[in-house]
Amino acid sequence: MTRLREEDISHIPLNLNEYNKKLLKDTGKSLGGIAAYAAGTTKEIIYNLRQDIPAAVIPITCGEGIINGFSISVQRIIDFLGFSAFVTDQKDVGGLAEAVEKGAKIIFLADDNRFVAINILTGKVVDNGEATGKGYAAALDLLSGGLRDKQVLLIGAGPVGTGASVFMSTHGAKVFVYDINREQAEKLKKNLPEVEIINNFYEALSQYDLLFDASPAEGIIGKEHLGEHMMISAPGIPLGLTRECLPLVPHRLIHDALEIGVATMLFDVLT
Ligand code: 2YG
């Protein structure tokens, strides 16, 4: 699991409106709309809940400690979706107590191993990895005009890739997976037999128009690999595409550090 750096997220609070407009233009749905679709619910259902369900974000100091801007970015994304959300003044256990004492019903917290949302009314726990996979798969479904009967090349069979495969398969896509660690791909195939394992990544890259990059590998896809119609959903941090690719795919690439994952966690934990 890639650890975010302050510079990966510092732009988020001020850029949410612009990013939301870009998602609406490219996918036809807003951040909330994509999250609702990923969670198998509707914005309307979730929005009817938001008045009575405050959310809290707790800064966690263990392991490598606090990432500056992490809690506030999570809080701003939840707030942007119309929920009342606050970052607790206290950290760790004190923060958890403060969150409950202040009436929070949804709690977001992350250490170096897990980033979760907890619904203390229902006991539901949602993991960022699976939620990010679902959110980005939903975005690719919308960006591509529907995944039914289409083939998707998935890079990375970890929690994000697994969450994505489940969504893409249930929406009719044929998923072909490559993972540098073949055992990881076999584990995914064990859980999802309809997935096909790819042995040669670069050979495969030129054969698919739909690419899902759930790997932490940086700059593995150059402009020579970009098909004319290729659409890319890339939750992987750092980005797998080289910088020179970016001007070539302005409306064919979905990538962010936190937004779609956090929005899907929120809608999923309320469903
Ligand atoms: O509370 C804090 O500031 C820290 N304990 C947060 C630590 C988060 C560590 N995890 C990550 O940086 C990412 N795996 C988060 C998810 C990124 C998804 N694209």
Image (tube, rainbow, N blue to C red):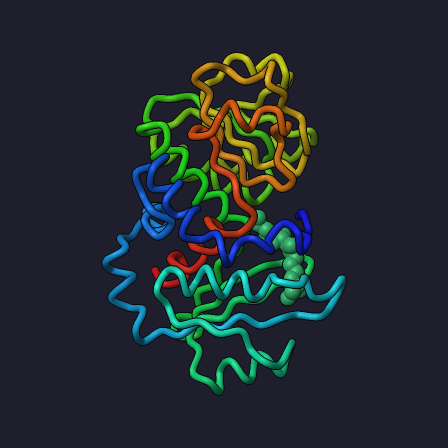
In-front residue for pair 162/236? 236
Residue 161, x across and y down, in percent: 54, 38
For the question of whether residue 81 can be seen, the reply is yes
Q: Residue at x 41, y 61 (%)?
A: 269
How many circles with numbers are drawn on the protein?
0
Q: Residue at x 66, y 70 (%)?
A: 60
In-front residue for pair 61/204? 61
Q: Quadrant of the C terminus?
A: bottom left
Image quadrant assignment for residue 124: bottom left
In-front residue for pair 195/256? 256
For the question of whether residue 186 can be seen, the reply is no
Relative to 53, is 217 on the left or the right?
A: right
Residue 113, x across and y down, in percent: 67, 57
In-front residue for pair 268/241? 241
Residue 215, x across and y down, in percent: 62, 36
Q: Residue at x 49, y 29 (%)?
A: 232
Give ligand 1's quarter of the image: bottom right
Residue 43, x across and y down, in percent: 28, 55
Relative to 107, is 225 on the left or the right?
A: right
**Residue lying furthest bottom:** 101
Q: Residue at x 67, y 32 (%)?
A: 183
